[in-house]
Amino acid sequence: MVLPVYIKIRITDMKKAALLRIAVTFALLLTSAHVHAQLLERAENLINTVLGDSVAGADADTVTVEERYRREAQRASEMESRLREMELEMQDMKLTEIMLRSELDGDRAADSLRLAEQRHSIDSLRELTPGVPVVVDGDTLLLLYAERGGYSAFDRAAMTAEIVMQAGTDRSLRRDSVYLLDNDGFVDIMYGGKVLLSVTDKDALWEGVPRLELAERYVPLFALKIESLQEAHSFWQLVKRVVLFVVVLAALYLMFRLTNYLFRKLRGRILRLTEDRLKSINIRDYELLNSRRLGRILIFCSNLLQYAILLIELILTVPLLFAIFPQTEALAMKIFGYILEPVKMVLKSVGEYIPNLFVIIVIWLCIRYIIKGLRFIANEIENEKLKISGFYPDWARPTFNIVRFLLYAFMIAMIYPYLPGSESGVFQGISVFVGLIVSLGSSTVIGNVIAGLVITYMRPYKVGDRIKLNDTTGNVIERTPFVTRLRTPKNEVVTIPNSFIMSSHTVNYSASAREYGLIIHTTVTIGYDAPWRQVHQLLINAARITPGVLEHPKPFVLETELQDYYPCYQINAYIKDADNIGPIMSDLHQNIQDIFNEAGVEIMSPHYYAGRDGNASTIPADYIKAGEDPHD
């Protein structure tokens, strides 16, 4: 009877292989009508289980990659265990079928033909299904294939291993020999009244030998293992282990003492070197580390090395101590695994990360040499060796800084996928959190940076210029992406945010002085009794003799107002040195007073009442010529 089974399920390769394996097993085993329904039911349950796992895996797309791998590995292990149990159960059913068919057809065929058919059927099953090993103390004694009395081959193997281990390690049991007890349908392998294993006809069919012969084959295996276990757990072995435990402890103590002694000697040597031979580390004119600081750093490093060596000695010794006794040997292996697994994981991660590290190095080198080339071009433009139409030399440095920042940002974006843990949800969550914090807390900072960029390309001033920002006048001494610093004529340093500069007006005295000549001006008020032409000439003369005032263009006078008691005269003069506006204005005011006093013209400002009734003139006595009446 042939049962066509078509399975087309889009799942992982491991599950495809498992389903293909089940299908082949079904095709070979489904030759009997009375097991047909049972096997179909089991196959349907198994396929539903696989499909259920696949759907569950599809719903877990939101979990991390590591968690998904762990779950897939766990499902694969459970699937493999279920498959093996399923195969063993199907083999059991097949064996039962073979035995029943042999009993029913005993009169119709010769014994030799029946045995040949049984061997052929069992050989076909053995090719598909591995046996379950009976492992005792790390040694595999035999393989089991068949169930017995409701216990699967897995259960029988576990119970047999536990009984043999107990017989070899329990000192309360009387030492005895392994013997056989032949019963109806099975043979018991006995030791001290305990049944180690019951060999059934199914076991004999699997091995292709009679039941009693198979049991006799197993006897020396159990006997040797029990004898070795008893010897390993004897009193003298216990004494030897205790002595070895003490020796290892003493060796650990001596290693600790020797390590501490050697490092004490090393620290003393470092102290002597500090006083005699160690020299300070200098970078140009800066003393980075003097001999005393260098000695303290060396001592600190020696302490770290000492603790690291002591920890390594302890890590290597503790598993060895636990491994001495069989009862704690498993714990020793577990502890050693706790130590070894992280090291293996780190080394494996480092080995797997080396290709990504080369990619990162190549990207970094490319960006580095691109930045070097841009720096060279920026220096050439800044020094005016390379001229680009419409591009000012003072733009070279800030433009280079902007391009360099963008290149570094581009490099980070390219390197990010190659960083360890970049695909982890935790890593990505931390990156998003940091970006959110920076964006929320840096709005003012970003505003100042943007304003600094705009100011750079607006070119309202440069370092060294005399400017006026609202009510603050001073020379620009520093310009950063965030702030601009001014030094006032009183040597006060004022820090102004760039965003404030963008929102206010700026007066640049130096730019006008360099290109056109800066016009300084001051206003005086003279009475109507003084001729205006004379006043104009006197003011122009005072400006010409003032240091710092240019001869060309010539100074000029503007009459700005005609007040009730006096007209207002404004003297204007050109200068080139905007940094000395204050001293030049002071000299101009002094010269105006001298020139007017020498000419006998009174400066009556803002209001001056003088009844010519004998009152003295306002002109200082030193300027009054001899013979003149000061009351005139």
Image (cartoon, helix red, strand yellow):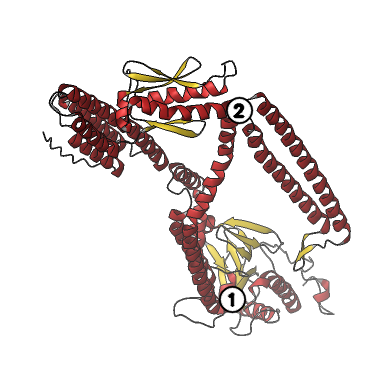
Q: Quadrant of residue 54?
A: top left
Residue at 59% in and 15% down: 172
Mark 1 neighbour class, 10 Å CA radius: few under 14, some 14 to 19, many 20 or more: some
Residue 41: percent from the left, percent from the top? 19, 26
SS class, disc 1:
helix
Mark 1 lies on residue:
513
Q: Could you tell me how far apart the alpha carbons at marks 1 and 2 are, in whole angstroms?
A: 108 Å
Mark 2 lies on residue:
231
Q: Quadrant of residue 246?
A: top right
Q: How many callouts does the rendering have?
A: 2
Residue at 65% in and 69% down: 524
Looking at the image, tell me whether mark 1 or mark 2 is earlier in sequence order: 2
* Nearer to us: label 1 or label 2: 2
Residue 101: percent from the left, percent from the top? 17, 25
Is residue 447 something that shows in the picture? no
Is residue 269 something that shows in the picture? yes
Q: Is residue 493 above or below residue 384?
A: above
Mark 2 neighbour class, 10 Å CA radius: few under 14, some 14 to 19, many 20 or more: some
